[in-house]
Amino acid sequence: MSTPSETAPTDDALQTEQRTAAVVYNPVKVHLPTLKQTIERHQRDAGWAETLWFETSEEDPGGGMTREALEAGADVVAAAGGDGTVRAVAEVVHGSDAALALLPSGTGNLLARNMKLPLDDLEASARTIFHGDDRPIDFGTLTVERDGGEREQLGFLVMAGLGLDARMLANTRPELKKRVGWLAYVDSLFRSVRDADAFEFRYQLDDDGNHSARAHSLIVGNCGQLQAGAILLPDAEIDDGVFDIAVMRPRGFLGWVRIGARVFWENGILRTFRRSSLANTAVGKKIVSASREERPLRYLRGQEFTARLEHADEFEVDGDPVGKVVAFRSRIDPLGLRVRVPKPGDDRHGSRQVP
């Protein structure tokens, strides 16, 4: 006669059998046969139900597919594609009972970079879907207003902004990006700087009243690392409940050189310093305070930020150009999104990071 433990599954086993993952994938960014084979192997190993598969399209980068996945009962929705796919999936997963997982497949992979997740290790990323933990992170919400008065709701994970960075993205040559990846942005940067006229705007940060400013770029960030090791926002943390805002206002070529030095070198040093014990000393506090007030690059922090421009300008969200806006309001939802991350000490499929 069988014992009860041999005939009746445990509560944990029943819960595991009922769990379902979904993959929303960009067919241009992934090799589907390899992706399916890897995912299904880890799914069987974990004892989960059959994985659901949804292909994005040019008309829908993933939002509609994610809604279908949630309606079908997915507990985890994995985004397999670039930053645009990740953002589209996250916008819908945000506020649901499901978690977001990442299968980085694009050029930027900004969220994965900032969360120190595997960038080029499919085995590690796939395993995390089924065996990882959920980490709550902040999620940014946007209301943008077009020149004609139309309004649109958007979400973002990394950063959103206007001015030079948005013009740079709008000017990036798609064929060059396919050939050389992030280096295409360097070509676009030089073409955009020549046309980087400053813009006038009014803004309000939390309840601090209205202010006027002039800048070449205005960026609201949830986390601060870009590609190639660049750090735009050295204070930004993905789960601290506040935005970090960068206002770029250089004067001439040397001003841009100063900003470049900050972003590509000094901010990395400053970030390490701020996490050290020296940062809490009197001298350390003076250094940190002075770094925030450097004229070409000013930093602000808060939970709600509203800006209105004199004239419409290009706007970008998580590295994707979304057209011109005349105003935007950003709010942060503290710990409003759960992301799957590897369990501590789980190195069965060692991840490899790329710069």
Image (cartoon, rainbow, N blue to C red):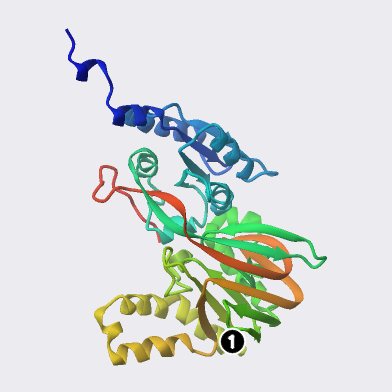
Please identify the quarter of the rendering in which residue 60 is found.
top right
Residue extending farthest top: 1
Instruction: Check disc 1 and report its element: helix, strand or loop.
Output: loop
Amino acid type at image mark 1 = Pro
Q: Is residue 159 visible?
A: no
Residue at (46% x, 81% y) in the render: 261
Quadrant that contains the N terminus: top left
Please identify the quarter of the rendering in which residue 65 is found.
top right
Quadrant that contains the C terminus: bottom left
Q: Nearer the viewer, residue 29 or 283?
A: 283
Q: Is residue 6 above or below residue 11?
A: above
Q: Is residue 309 visible?
A: yes
Q: Left or right: 41 with respect to 170?
A: left
Q: Left or right: 99 with respect to 217?
A: left
Q: Left or right: 325 with respect to 97?
A: right
Residue extending farthest right: 148
Report crowding for label 1: few under 14, some 14 to 19, many 20 or more residues within 10 A (C-alpha).
Answer: some
Q: Left or right: 108 with respect to 307?
A: left
Residue corresponding to mark 1? 250
Residue at (48% x, 42% y) in the render: 78
Residue 144 percent location from the top left of the image: 69, 64
Residue 284 percent location from the top left of the image: 31, 88
Residue 269 percent location from the top left of the image: 35, 78
Q: Nearer the viewer, residue 30 or 21?
A: 21
- All told, the count of numbered labels is 1
Residue 150 percent location from the top left of the image: 78, 61
Residue at (29% x, 84% y) in the render: 280
Q: Nearer the viewer, residue 175 or 167?
A: 167
